[in-house]
């Protein structure tokens, strides 16, 4: 039996009085989703200034929040939503709620929508395993939006962190018009797969390839990325559904070089952004997920040389055709969004 809704029902409102589902997701730059533990007073006090530096502030209610601090975190998220002017800095306001089978999920969602539902852009849902999880959250959000008079549908961003979720990622991506995107949760996914690692993202020194033996020469070897397959599959699922794919956390906040490399791998594979768990990861995400100015300028030359995207031209000794025109358009379109968010990039891109 298919879990996919028939086309005539896909955009039907799920509750009387709820806002009509969006036909297209809002176009926003979301290079970094900056996680904030809202139960900590000193962290909440920094959010107004932090919101000016990041693309998304996320009030985290799930992992990393102790069980005895769940209520305080929920209250802190409400305080952030009520006191911070996110529109002034064109910054998104998200929250990662507790997982669906936890004792806190229902209160997280009902409280947030009742108190700051008109400020909330996206709910991040952990450990999504199939479209049935999205259908439940979809229906619940519609009911609460209707109850509280919320005018804009709240998006859903799923975290891919179980083997079952990876198996069903294509169905998850297509489960609801609320779907904003999917991000990778490597720590929980590693445990679900029974991977032998305690790392949160990144490579592993024992996951390597080694060249065939050559007499008289030491065999070369190189560390590999165990997340390559999963990220690529997630990107394909999201791209086919017209939603965003994002990398999740890089846990070693002291290894900035490895963090940058993991973010760059994800960017090159098609991801739109990543989590920042510490302020020192914000600038990395900003740099990595903003197209390189030289790449943007060359891409702009391709579009200028092929205004309608047809034919073949030579630029700097390289052949350009309709396929490279499409690649160039991806880069230039992203650069224009980044330039709207950050004036410094507008100058660098020459727009």
Image: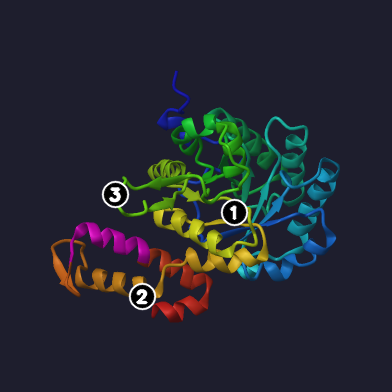
* Residue range highlighted in magenta: 319-331
Comparing 106 with 204, the one in front is 204
Comparing 191 with 331, the one in front is 191
Alpha carbons under labels 2 and 1: distance apart: 27 Å
Residue 336 x, y percent position in the rendering: 42, 69
Mark nearer the viewer, 2 or 1:
1
Residue 328 x, y percent position in the rendering: 30, 64
Q: Secondary structure at mark 2?
A: helix
Q: Residue at x 61, y 35 (%)?
A: 191
Q: Earlier in the sequence, mark 3 or mark 1?
A: 3
Secondary structure that dominates the magenta span: helix
> Residue 235 lies in magenta, yes or no?
no
Residue 111 x, y percent position in the rendering: 77, 43
According to the picture, the residue beneath numbered tag 1 turns out to be 250
Marks 3 and 2 close (CB-CB < 8 Å):
no
Screen quadrant of the C terminus: bottom left
Q: Earlier in the sequence, mark 2 or mark 1?
A: 1
Comparing 137 with 160, the one in front is 160
Residue 199 x, y percent position in the rendering: 61, 47
Alpha carbons under labels 3 and 1: distance apart: 37 Å
Q: Earlier in the sequence, mark 3 or mark 2?
A: 3
Alpha carbons under labels 3 and 2: distance apart: 40 Å
Screen quadrant of the N terminus: top left
Q: Residue at x 71, y 44 (%)?
A: 63
According to the picture, the residue beneath numbered tag 2 turns out to be 294
According to the picture, the residue beneath numbered tag 3 turns out to be 214
């Amino acid at each position: 039996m298919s879990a996919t809704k028939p086309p005539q029902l896909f955009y039907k409102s799920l509750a009387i009085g709820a806002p009509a589902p969006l036909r297209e997701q809002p176009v926003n730059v979301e290079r970094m989703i900056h996680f904030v533990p809202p139960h900590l007073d000193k962290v909440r006090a920094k959010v107004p200034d932090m919101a000016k530096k990041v693309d998304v502030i996320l009030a985290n209610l799930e992992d990393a929040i102790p069980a005895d601090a769940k209520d305080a975190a929920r209250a802190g998220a409400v305080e952030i939503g009520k006191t911070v002017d996110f529109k002034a800095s064109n910054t998104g306001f998200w929250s990662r709620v507790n997982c669906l089978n936890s004792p806190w999920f229902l209160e997280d969602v009902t409280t947030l929508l009742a108190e700051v539902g008109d400020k909330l852009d996206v709910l991040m849902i952990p450990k999504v395993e199939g479209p049935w999880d999205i259908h439940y959250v979809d229906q619940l959000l519609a009911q609460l939006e209707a109850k509280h008079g919320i005018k804009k549908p709240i998006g859903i961003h799923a975290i891919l962190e179980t083997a079952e979720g990876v198996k069903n990622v294509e169905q998850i991506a297509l489960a609801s018009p609320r779907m904003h995107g999917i991000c990778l949760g490597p720590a929980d996914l590693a445990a679900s797969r029974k991977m032998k690692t305690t790392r949160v993202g990144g490579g592993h020194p024992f996951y390597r390839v080694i060249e065939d033996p050559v007499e008289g020469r030491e065999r070369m070897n190189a560390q590999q990325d165990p997340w390559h397959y999963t990220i690529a599959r997630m990107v394909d699922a999201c791209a086919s559904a017209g939603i965003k794919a994002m990398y999740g956390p890089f846990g070693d906040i002291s290894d900035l070089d490895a963090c940058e490399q993991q973010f760059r791998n994800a960017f090159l594979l098609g991801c739109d952004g990543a989590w920042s768990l510490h302020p020192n990861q914000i600038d990395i995400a900003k740099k990595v997920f903003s197209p390189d100015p030289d790449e943007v300028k060359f891409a702009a030359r391709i579009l200028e040389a092929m205004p309608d995207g047809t034919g073949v031209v030579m630029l700097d000794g390289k052949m350009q055709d309709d396929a490279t025109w499409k690649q160039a358009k991806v880069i230039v379109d992203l650069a224009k969004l980044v330039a709207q968010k950050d004036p410094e990039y507008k100058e660098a891109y020459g727009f």
